[in-house]
Image (spheres, rainbow, N blue to C red):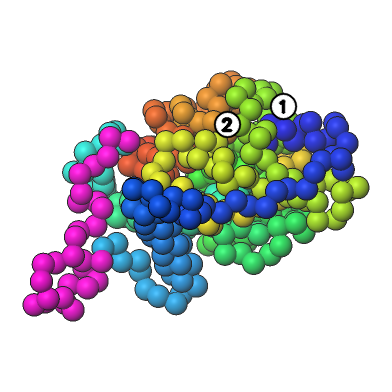
Amino acid sequence: MGSLVSCLSDPCPSASPPPQAKRRSSTSSRGRGGGRDSAKATMAIDEEALAAAAALVLGQRGAVGAFERSASVRCAAKRQGQGPPLPRSCSTRPRSLADPELQPQQLLAKDLNTKYLETNIIVLVHGGGFGAWCWYKTISLLEDSGFKVNAIDLTGSGIHSYDTNKISSLSEYSEPLTSYLKGLGVAEKVILVGHDFGGACISYAMEMFPSKIAKAVFLCAAMLTNGHSALDMFQQQMDTNGTLQKAQEFVYSNGKDRPPTAINIDKALLRDLLFNQSPSKDVSLASVSMRPIPFAPVLEKLVLTAENYGSVRRFYVETTEDNAIPLPLQQSMCGTNPPEKVLRLKGADHAPFFSKPQALHKTLVEIATMPPVQAS
């Protein structure tokens, strides 16, 4: 998004149309000794990612029951007497050094009784281009700890079928979230977790429904002040390594003589920009699941008041290896608009739900279990 500023100041119509998405090819490796094995490994990763995405979509539509974490559990009865059992799920395989924060026996808050918390409902709001699918690890861990979790697909995101290019405002983009909050009971409260541009969405919701939000968590997210937009946030510090600017591809569905309607991220640069610490299978999942980012909400300046937005407890979670919203920019936002507490995920990229799922889980549980502030 760092180049959004240049897009508005320079004549955008002269920009060349976005290039077609590049597809991986395995034909270039034919005839070489290790080519076939490499191609098979790539295809296996893509198939695994597609299967995970399909399972999540079907589960959200009510076509199937709860997601089964292990094929060895699902197929155990059928395989009796048919040789050795299938391998167990990846949770029992040797842990990767990519997430050394917690040992397996520490992953879940097993002794936590969520019934006695201020609220045990956590609502996860994805960032620009993402969808509810990106939270699959976080959902599983939080539910196993006793929380009720809802992952929202914002308008034109995930499996929400609306055309991203037609989204004209932040209120329209955030409508699935505000509709959910509107439907809560009188005494019900939730914890909102917003990632990336989802920070602007939860800020908008905090202004509209402050009494229904116990805490708001900004996860490497846009934490804006009154009268500012996400575009203003990126003006504070332009992308230092150029990756963000190179990765952006503007979409002009209303013609080149009109402002952009959406932003695509070049799939060839996804890993460098968003997933530089994430597992390959999650990068593959993102590459087949991400959708364009609506442009109009990025430009919209928020109206936030001390009475509404300011009455909700805010927490910020920093990610130290973030190439999309670098750590200095995150710290700048916290300095300008101080939250109640700043927490840090060491070694996390811009997608900590992929790169540091257990550490993120521990942090969210820590925030959720903080007692209510006593009225003075």
Up-down: is 96 above or below 328? below
Q: Which residues are magenta?
A: 71-98
Task: Tell me what residue is drawn at x 70 percent, y 48 percent.
Answer: 19
Task: Tell me what residue is drawn at x 46 percent, y 28 percent.
Answer: 321
Q: Is residue 219 visible?
A: no
Instruction: Return the residue at label 2.
Output: 325
Tell me the distance, in whole angstroms, between the alpha carbons under discs 1 and 2.
12 Å
Q: Amino acid at mark 2?
A: Ile
Quarter of the image where the N terminus is located: top right
Q: Position of residue 10 (x, y in %)?
A: 86, 32
Up-down: is 64 above or below 31? below
Q: Position of residue 360 (x, y in %)?
A: 38, 40
Left or right relative to 248: residue 119: left
Q: Is 93 contained in the magenta span?
A: yes
Task: Tell me what residue is drawn at x 49 percent, y 50 percent.
Answer: 28
The dot on residue 235 is 1
State which quadrant residue 197 falls in: top right
Task: Tell me what residue is drawn at x 46 percent, y 27 percent.
Answer: 320
Left or right relative to 223: residue 193: left
Relative depth, front residue between 249 and 352: 249
The dot on residue 18 is none
Q: Amino acid at mark 1?
A: Gln
Q: Position of residue 301 (x, y in %)?
A: 76, 38
Give whichever of discs 1 and 2 has the lower sequence position: 1
